[in-house]
Image: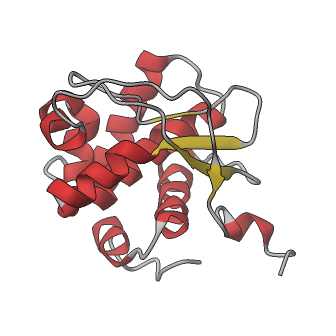
Amino acid sequence: MLCEMSETFSEKLRKAKDLPAIFEIVKLAVIKTRKKRRAGLMLGIADLGNHPRGFLGAFYPVATNIIVMNRIPLERIKETNPELYKPYVFHVLLHEYLHALGDVDEHSTRRTTYEICKEVFGPEHLATKMSEDYSQFFPNLVYPDAAWTPRTLNVELVDEFDKSSASYIR
C-alpha cells in the first residue's frame, strides 16, 4: 500500500509526491467508500484548451483505459495557487476514475465525487469544496482573456501511473 492505513486521507494527500501517488489515494478512497476498483489505467497529459469562463479538466473516453488531463489548469494552479494542486488533481482523477468504473452519467458522477470527497476528507477540505462547487475556483484555474482549442491532441503518458495494479511489471 502507498501509506499506512492509520493515516487520514488528508495526510496521505499532503504527502503525495506526484500524479501516480495521488491516483493511489483516489483508488483507496473508492475502495473504502464504494468497494469498487479497476486496474490497468493510464494517464495522459495534453493541452485541451482554455476559455476564460471555464475549461475541460480531463476526460475519460468510454471503453478505454486512459484518462486524459488538461495540462493548462495544472500549470495555472502551480502559477497562481499551488495549495490547490493536490486537491484539484484528486478531485479530477476521482471524477474520471468513477467514469472508468462505469458511471458515465455526468450529474451522477459529480454527485458521487462530492460524496466520496466529503466522506474521506470532510466538508471543509479543498477537494470536497471543489467537488461541491467547482465554479468558485475558476479564477485560479483559467487564463483570463485567453480562449483557444488545440489543433491536434498530443498526449504525453505519465510514467508508472496505476503502478499498484501492475506489480508484475518491473
Q: Is 86 left or right of 138, judged from the image as shown?
A: right
Type of colouring: secondary structure
Looking at this rendering, what residue extends furthest in the right direction? Answer: 168
For residue 159, above or below residue 69: below
Between 82 and 150, the residue placed more toward the observer is 150
In the image: residue 168, left or right of residue 156: right
Q: Nearer the viewer, residue 154 or 28?
A: 154
In the rendered image, residue 131, in percent from the top left (x then y), is placed at 29, 37
Q: In this rendering, is residue 170 above or below 122?
A: below
Residue at x-position 32% and y-position 49%: 88
Height in image: 135 above or below 73? above
Q: Toward which corner of the image does residue 14 lie, by quadrant? A: bottom left
Going 47% across and 19% down the picture, which residue do you hit?
A: 106
- Of residues 87 and 153, the one drawn nearer to the viewer in this rendering: 153
The percent coordinates of residue 17 (x first, y second) are 42, 76
Q: Quadrant of the rendered structure where residue 159 is?
A: bottom right
Q: Is residue 55 left or right of residue 37?
A: left
Compared with residue 158, is residue 124 higher up or lower down, i.e. above or below?
A: above
Q: Quadrant of the N terminus?
A: bottom right
The reply to whether residue 121 is visible in this rendering is no
Q: Given the current orientation, which residue lies at the most extreme front position?
A: 151
Residue 82 is at least partly visible in this image: yes
Left or right, 12 with respect to 140, comes to: right
Name which quarter of the figure residue 50 lies in.
top left
Instruction: Tell me the quadrant of the picture where the C terminus can be found.
Output: bottom right
User: Where residue 135 appears, x then y in whole percent?
Assistant: 18, 28
Q: Residue at x 55, y 66 (%)?
A: 20
